[in-house]
Image (cartoon, rainbow, N blue to C red):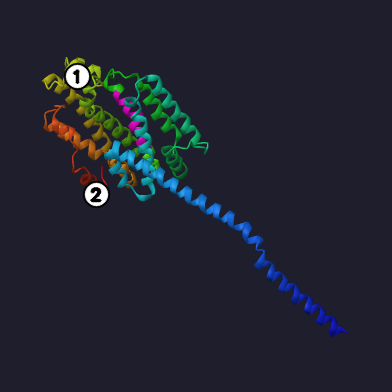
Amino acid sequence: MASGISAKHGLLTTKCSVFHSLQRKILPHAICIQRPTEVKCLRASTNSTIESQHNEKYCIDIVRSRDYDGFVSSLLLPEDARRSSLALRAFNVELAQVKDSVSQKTIGLMRMQFWKTTVEEIYRDDPPVQPVSAELWRAVKKHYLTKRWMLRIISEREKDMEDRAYRNLQELEAYSDNTQSSLLYLLLESLGVKDVHADHAASHIGKAQGIVMCLRATPYNSSRRKVYLPMDICMLHRASQEDFIRGSREQNVRDVVYDIASQAHVHLQHARSFSKNIPASAFPAFLQTVVLEDYLQRVRRVDFDVFHPSLQKRNPLIPIQLYFRSWKKTY
C-alpha cells in the first residue's frame, strides 16, 4: 500500500514536471513579458548615447569654428576636464555671438534671458533640450561648478548689448574680468583647482585676454563702423572714431594701440608673478597666455599698426607653441 502511494505520487510528480516543461515551451509568458522591456531599455540607452555624442560634437564644432585658440587649448587639458572645458567655451561662444547676430537690442536681451533661465534650470537638474545646455549640465554635475560665475558672464554680456565704446580702460578691464576671468575660474574648477593664487592669476589673465580681444577685433568692428576702444585713451592722443573707421595708420592711432596693448602686457606680467605659488594642475587653464603673448609680440613688430594685414592672419605655429608650453607646464 505504501509502495502504491509512493508510485502514485511519483507518477503525479512526473506528470506535473512534464506538464510544466511543455507549458514553458508552448506558452513562454515570462519571456514575452520581459523582452519588450529589455528592448525598450536597450533602445533608450542607445538613443541616450547617440544624443550625448551629438551634444558633444556640437560643442566641439562651435568652439573649433568660433574660438579656435580655445579649442586647441581645450584639447591639451587632462582628459577628465576636456569635455567640460569645451562645454564651457561653447557656452561662452553662444553668449559672445548674440551681440553680432541680432539686429535689435530687444532680441539680444531675450536671448540673454534664455541663458539666465537655462543656468537656473541646469542647477535644478532640469536642463532644456539644447546641446550646449546638456553638456553644461553634465559639466556642472561632474565638477560642481559655481553658478555665480556663469550668471556673471551672462549679466556682463547683457550690459554690453548697449553697443557703445568703453568710457575708459578701467571699464574695459571690468568687462574683461567679469567675462574672461569668470570663464577661467570655471576652467580651474573643472580641473579641480581651488587656490587663491590661481584665482589672482586668472583675474589678470582674463583682463589681458579681454583687452587683446578688443584690439584684435578693431579692424572687423571698424569695417562695420563701430569702435569700442576706450574713449579716454583715444581722446588723450586726439584719435577720433572716424580715424579708426577709415583704418588710419597715423601715429596717434598707433599711440592708442600702444597704450592699450601695454596694459594687457602688464596684466600678463602680474599673472606670471604668481606662478611659483600656483599648483601645477592649474597651469593648463592658463595656456591661452600663449595666444595673448603671440599677438602682443606681432603688434609690436608692426609698430602697433592694428590694421596691418599680418595681424589678420592666424599664426600657424600656435598649436605647436601651445603643446610646448603644456609640456613645460608653464604659462
**Image location (x, y in percent) of residue 61:** 33, 41
Q: Nearer the viewer, residue 194 or 207?
A: 207
Quarter holding the N terminus is bottom right
Amino acid of disc 1: Ile
Residue drawn at x 56%, y 56% as measured from the top left: 38
Quarter holding the C terminus is top left
Quarter occupied by residue 180: top left
The numbered dot on residue 245 is 1
Specify the farthest residue to the right.
1
**Image location (x, y in percent) of residue 16:** 75, 72
Task: Decide which of tag 2 and tag 1 comes sooner along the chain.
Answer: 1
Q: Nearer the viewer, residue 238 or 199?
A: 238
Residue drawn at x 14%, y 23% as measured from the top left: 254
Q: Is residue 192 visible?
A: no
Amino acid of disc 2: Lys
Which residue is tagged 2? 328
Residue drawn at x 34%, y 47% as measured from the top left: 281
Q: In the displayed structure, would residue 176 be above or below residue 64?
A: above
Quarter occupied by residue 166: top left
Span highlighted in magenta in the image: 172-185
- The answer to whether the residue labelled 2 contacts the one labelled 1, judged by CB atoms less than 8 Å apart, is no
**Image location (x, y in percent) of residue 247:** 16, 22
Decide whether residue 20 is among the magenta residues: no
Q: Main secondary structure of the magenta part?
A: helix
Left or right of 227? Residue 53 is right
Secondary structure type for disc 2: helix
